[in-house]
Image: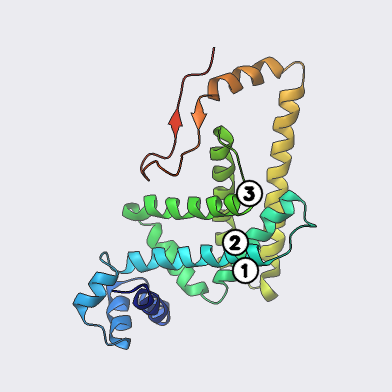
Amino acid sequence: MSNNQHEKLLEAILQHVVCDGWSETSVKAAGADLNLNAEDAKLLCPRGAIDLAQAFHRAGDAAMVQAMSDADLSGFRYSEKVAQALKFRVAAMSEHREAVRRASSLFALPQNTGEGAKLIWETADHVWKALGDTSEDVNWYTKRATLSAVWAAVVLFWLGDESEGSEATSAFIDRRIEDVMRIEKAKAAFRENPLTRPFASFQSSLLSGIRAPTDSEVDDLPGRWAPPKS
């Protein structure tokens, strides 16, 4: 089965998700719209609706990355670039609010929370990669963990945002990124303060063995650790 057919099935299911959620009922209805029998639909999404919900999320990430590539962000501060990336991501899902709401409910189910967390992490990872992040130590993880938390909060806020053009969400993003920058400044001050510098140095030594994953590592091994250099 071709990627084109998979994309068509994803597009077809969105109109059914509004009423029936990311469910087998929606998959069957979307397949019927495309004259796909059950066997062909199963080949396109072996696990059914959850596969299409994942594809929906990743399509939004791809649209965000493309928007970042097309935009001229040269005059932006780094924090502004991060905020703009999240605004692009919101724009990518703006026409499918109910589909996002239903997907959030799907990935909140106990059996799906791991996959939901992975998708949020992927969004954060795409942002940092698109901005040229070169960190290879523990910062690789802290950057993505922090932005994952921000993005999760943004989605929840946006789902209840009734402002024109999601202006309230844009302002919310700016505030959250500003909060993150304040934390980073506080961490820098902690490292530079003569009284706390020894503790910061100890922490840095303790975490110095943590390394970011490489492209050759498998998906279920997100990183590696090596003993700190003596």
Which comes before the other along the chain, label 3 or label 2?
Answer: 3
Amino acid on which disc 2 is placed: Phe
Q: In screen coordinates, is 106 left or right of 35?
A: right
Q: Residue at x 70, y 37 (%)?
A: 184
Residue of label 3:
132
Amino acid on which disc 1 is placed: Asp
Residue 161's disc number: 1
**Mark 3 vs mark 1: in front:** 3
Residue of label 2:
157
Label 1: few (<14), some (14–19) or many (≥20) C-alpha neighbours in 10 Å: some
Q: Secondary structure at mark 2?
A: helix
Amino acid on which disc 3 is placed: Gly
Q: Secondary structure at mark 1?
A: loop
Residue 150, can we see it? no
Q: In screen coordinates, is 184 left or right of 10?
A: right
The reply to whether the C-beta atoms of the residues labelled 3 and 2 are less than 8 Å apart is no
- Viewer-proximal residue among 130 and 197: 130
- Viewer-proximal residue among 134 and 193: 134
The total number of labels drawn is 3
**Mark 3 vs mark 2: in front:** 3
- In whole angstroms, how far apart are the C-alphas of marks 2 and 1? 6 Å
